[in-house]
Image (cartoon, helix red, strand yellow):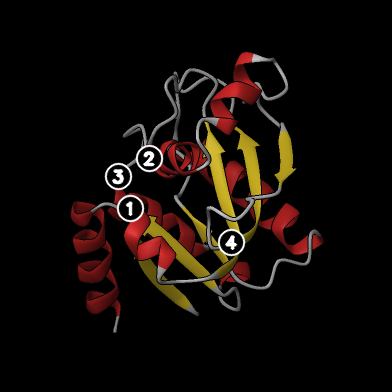
Amino acid sequence: MALSVLPLDLTRWDESARDCLVLPVFKDDRPLRGAAGLADWRLCGKLSRLVKASRASADAGETLLLPPGRRLRFRRLLWFGLGDARGYSDDRFRKDLAWILDVVIKAGVTDWSLQMPGRASGQIGARRAIEILLEDPRFADQPLTLIEDPAGQKDIAELLRAQR
């Protein structure tokens, strides 16, 4: 698996140009959190304005392709609406991850960064999220960069070390 980790830090994002930033967002994540919140900050509130104008809702199944402008080192942004955070489970996480992967593949994305669904709002732990991700063989040949906070980075590193 071509897996790497990128800190949840705009300065580090600036050092690492990527094809696509993937932003899974719950409908009830207001203000936007995690990677979506940082991207919104860097884009001077563009994502929040889309939500406020009802052009983005984060309803389950919503997908938007957005240009990042010059302020982010990604060629494109993909927004994925996850619906309500309430009752988020391992099963929903698996379905959301499979859906995101399907869209990314169909969009011809070559190198992508993702804060896994539910991580920004604490609906799923980093260790559990990476365990589920590693169960899916379709991720084996994906050039994926996970966006994580320091605690999540530590959990992921420990898990990957233990698997070697």
In the image: residue 6, left or right of residue 46: left
- Classify mark 2: residues with Cα within 10 Å, few (<14), some (14-19) or many (20+): many
If you read the primary sequence from the N terminus, does the residue marked by circle 2 or circle 3 appear first? Answer: 2
Check disc 2 and give the amino acid type.
Gly
Where is 66 relative to 33, above or below? below
Kindly check if marks 3 and 4 are in contact, taking CB atoms under 8 A apart as contact.
no
Is label 2 or label 3 in front? 2
Circle 1 residue: 8
Q: What residue is drawn where x is 49% and y is 37%? A: 40
Q: CA distance from mark 2 to mark 1?
A: 7 Å
Give me the disc on residue 147. none
Kindly check if marks 1 and 3 are in contact, taking CB atoms under 8 A apart as contact.
no
Is label 3 or label 4 in front? 4
- Residue 32 in percent (x, y) is at 44, 28
Give me the disc on residue 74. 4
Q: Quadrant of residue 60?
A: top right
Is label 4 or label 2 in front? 4
Q: Quadrant of residue 49?
A: top right
Check disc 4 and give the amino acid type.
Phe
Check disc 3 and give the amino acid type.
Gly
Of 155 and 15, the residue lying toward us: 15
If you read the primary sequence from the N terminus, does the residue marked by circle 1 or circle 4 appear first? Answer: 1
Q: CA distance from mark 4 to mark 2?
A: 17 Å
Give me the disc on residue 34. 2
Circle 3 residue: 125
If you read the primary sequence from the N terminus, does the residue marked by circle 1 or circle 3 appear first? Answer: 1
If you read the primary sequence from the N terminus, does the residue marked by circle 4 or circle 2 appear first? Answer: 2
If you read the primary sequence from the N terminus, does the residue marked by circle 2 or circle 1 appear first? Answer: 1
Where is 68 relative to 134, above or below? above
- Classify mark 4: residues with Cα within 10 Å, few (<14), some (14-19) or many (20+): many
